[in-house]
Image (spheres, rainbow, N blue to C red):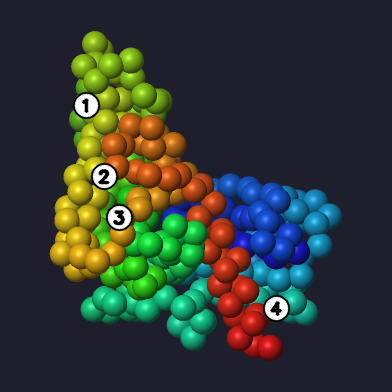
Amino acid sequence: MLLAIDVGNTNTVLGAFDGEKLIHSWRVKTDPRDTADELWLQYRALLDGITIDGLSICSTVPATLRELRNMVARYFSDIPVTIVEPGIKTGVPLLVDNPKEIGADRIVNTLAAHTLFGSSGPCIVVDFGTSTNLDVVSPKGEFLGGALAPGIEISVDALAARAAQLRKVELIKPKSVIGKNTVEALQSGTIYGFAGQVDGLVKRIIEELELLYPEAGATTVIATGGLAPLVVGISELIDSYEPDLTLLGLAMVFDRNAKFGD
């Protein structure tokens, strides 16, 4: 069974695959202070007897990636391991100024989005995490670049920290856009505000894509990430929600490299 590990700045998402089917997934907090032994103990408890015969890993946290390498060397040295980094076959051309700047998760999301949704046209992946990432995928599956914005939670945290009369609130859809109290006003500004931000960026990106690829089909907009459910039902331009997009991409990368090594 393949274990896919997606290490983000706030959370780490793990998924166990039986063939191409994702059968279990878990979400835990990311702590850059965790050692290789602590990571192994945590993952072993989650797996609870599941036998792992392959690992596919991407990480945006250098300290955790270093300890994951140590964990792999110590506890998984006898199974194939794919870490998304330079030299790994992803099949995703990076058409940007400095490919080394692109996070591994964005490359994996590009592969998964094109494979699952990009048969007739370009894609935009909106990943709602610590930051809100909009990744643009060409009709050929190339990573064209995108836009990065502060994430929902860190924006709320910053507002509460800097405004004396404001505080953190539960992130749920308010009863109306016009908030009748401070809590509802904050919820409205956050939820509807981020939906509007995403729709505005997506609209402008689609306009550029139509100029670049006038013969291509319609652009598909895919939402993913832990905070995506807050916005999916409110955004006017998000077409699909795939919570496991990165895990599915990691499984695809593992499969590509396993076949390459045969």
Q: Position of residue 205 (x, y in %)?
A: 21, 56
Residue bearing the label numbered 4:
80
Q: Amino acid at mark 3?
A: Ala
Report, in whole angstroms, how far the alpha carbon at label 3 lies from the one at label 2.
Answer: 18 Å
Report, in whole angstroms, how far the alpha carbon at label 4 lies from the one at label 2.
Answer: 38 Å
Query: Which of the two residues, 5 or 144, is positioned nearer the viewer here?
Result: 144
- Quadrant of the snapshot with the C terminus: bottom right
Q: Amino acid at mark 4?
A: Pro
Q: Position of residue 80 (x, y in %)?
A: 70, 78
Task: First in sequence, mark 4 or 3: give its number.
Answer: 4
- Give the vertical position of 42 relative to 250 (above or below): above
As helix, strand or loop, the secondary structure at mark 3 comes to loop
Left or right of 201? Residue 15 is right
Q: Amino acid at mark 2?
A: Val
Residue bearing the label numbered 2:
198
Task: First in sequence, mark 3 or 1: give its number.
Answer: 1
Residue 36 visible? The answer is yes
Left or right of 150? Residue 35 is right
Locate residue 172: give its quadrant: top left
Q: Position of residue 204 (x, y in %)?
A: 17, 53
Q: Residue sitting at 58 percent across and 77 percent down?
A: 256
As helix, strand or loop, the secondary structure at mark 2 comes to helix
Report, in whole angstroms, how far the alpha carbon at label 4 lies from the one at label 3.
Answer: 38 Å
Q: Residue sitting at 24 percent across and 11 percent down?
A: 180
Task: First in sequence, mark 4 or 2: give its number.
Answer: 4
Report, in whole angstroms, how far the alpha carbon at label 3 lies from the one at label 1.
Answer: 46 Å
- Local crowd size for mark 4, using a 10 Å CA cut-off: few (<14), some (14–19), many (≥20): some
Q: Amino acid at mark 1?
A: Ala
Q: Nearer the viewer, mark 4 or mark 3?
A: 3
Residue bearing the label numbered 1:
164
Q: Nearer the viewer, mark 3 or mark 2?
A: 3
Task: First in sequence, mark 3 or 2: give its number.
Answer: 2
